[in-house]
């Protein structure tokens, strides 16, 4: 009896040690060179937890150090650091968080308090609500914030940050590298599909087309766009996405007025006139618009 118990204990202990030794999936991040001093740590689309590392990260190498735009999911910090080290000896000195989500802010604590973390005011407020930034971890919250526009650095190292209004959340930053004519949109333009508007963080698919119109009017002189979660895009692609979101909004408003269900509204929205677009997220976006419209008096 005693021996059986002991044996059982050993088996359990042995299984636990096998579990501990099972190697985690290798953390693979691809790097894309956009310019001599600008790289992108690329993103897969969310969906496969084994390979999804978080959003597209811009790696901007300046005289004073490296600025990252976003820093992927928690647990990927070392992989991000290794990739950055593969292209520069300079230290990471600044992280711009485009918005609050964990696949864009997940390694703020990994890079520590020696880096300057920058975000829009509302994003900092949203981050304060996240478990990752509670208690002692509040020291990793953004130290530098802004309301509408902020310029960092000058000359070839200049970075312009813009806030144009609600969409994906209520605190999304558009990051421009003027000398390189490159714009990082964060998740305000994440993919060619229905937008995700995070209502719990002030997002609005009702406001999104209007906000994107302001972006298009307000940010000129860029050739390349780094979107939140898909391959590099152009300003023409952003304009098409704006039209897509406006079309989706008016379609949803009309469908709701006509008493149609979300399923019916999704079935009658055609993505074919938007080349390269999917409709995997269209129904969820329409649901989100319905929810927003229902809340309004
Ligand atoms: Zn997001």
Image (spheres, helix red, strand yellow):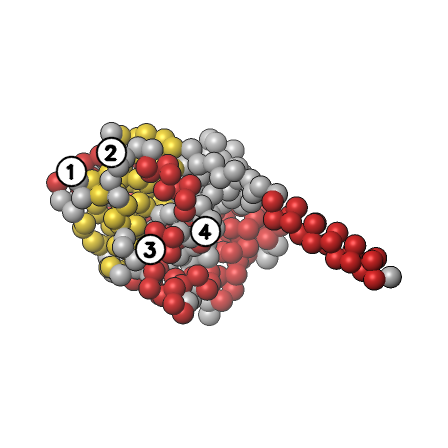
User: Mark on residue 107?
Assistant: none
Which residue is located at x 27 percent, y 55 percent?
A: 114
The crowd level at tag 4 (other Cα within 10 Å; few <14, some 14-19, many 20+) is: some
**Real-space CA distance between mark 1 and mark 4, rounded to the nearest whole angstrom:** 31 Å
- Whether pointer 3 and pointer 1 mark residues with C-beta atoms closer than 8 Å, the reply is no
At numbered mark 2, what does the secondary structure look like: helix, strand or loop? loop
Could you tell me residue 48's position as x and y percent?
56, 42
SS at circle 4:
loop
Give the side of residue 209 with respect to residue 280, left or right.
left
Label 3, residues with CA under 10 Å away: few <14, some 14-19, many ≥20? few
Q: Front-most of 121 and 293?
A: 121
For label 3, the residue is 112
Q: Which residue matches tag 1?
A: 156
Q: Which residue is mark 4?
A: 74
Q: Earlier in the sequence, mark 3 or mark 4?
A: 4
Nearer mark to the viewer, of 3 and 4:
3
Picture disc at residue 37: 2
Circles 2 and 1, Cβ within 8 Å, touching? The answer is: yes
Distance from disc 2 to disc 3, alpha carbons, whole Å, reads 23 Å
SS class of the residue under badge 1?
Answer: helix
């Amino acid at each position: 009896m005693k021996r059986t118990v002991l044996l059982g204990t050993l088996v359990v202990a042995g299984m636990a040690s096998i579990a501990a030794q099972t190697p985690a999936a290798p953390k693979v991040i691809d790097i894309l060179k956009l310019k001599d001093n600008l790289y992108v740590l690329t993103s897969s689309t969310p969906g496969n937890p084994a390979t999804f590392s978080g959003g597209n990260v811009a790696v901007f190498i300046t005289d004073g150090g490296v600025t990252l735009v976003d820093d992927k999911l928690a647990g990927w910090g070392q992989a991000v650091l290794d990739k950055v080290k593969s292209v520069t000896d300079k230290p990471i000195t600044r992280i711009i968080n485009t918005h609050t989500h964990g696949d864009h802010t997940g390694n703020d604590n990994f890079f520590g308090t020696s880096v300057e973390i920058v975000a829009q005011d509302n994003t900092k407020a949203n981050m304060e609500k996240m478990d990752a930034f509670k208690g002692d971890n509040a020291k990793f919250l953004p130290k530098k914030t802004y309301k509408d526009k902020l310029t960092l650095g000058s000359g070839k190292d200049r970075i312009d940050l813009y806030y144009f209004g609600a969409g994906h959340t209520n605190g999304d930053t558009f990051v421009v590298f003027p000398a390189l004519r490159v714009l990082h949109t964060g998740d305000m333009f994440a993919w060619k599909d229905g937008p995700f508007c995070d209502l719990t963080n002030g997002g609005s698919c009702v406001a999104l087309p209007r906000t994107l119109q302001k972006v298009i009017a307000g940010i000129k002189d860029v050739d390349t766009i780094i979107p939140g979660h898909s391959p590099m895009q152009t300003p023409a692609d952003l304009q098409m996405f704006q039209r897509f979101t406006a079309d989706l909004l008016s379609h949803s408003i009309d469908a709701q007025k006509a008493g149609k269900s979300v399923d019916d509204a999704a079935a009658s929205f055609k993505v074919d006139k938007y080349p390269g677009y999917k409709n995997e997220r269209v129904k969820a976006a329409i649901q989100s618009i319905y929810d927003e419209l229902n809340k309004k008096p």
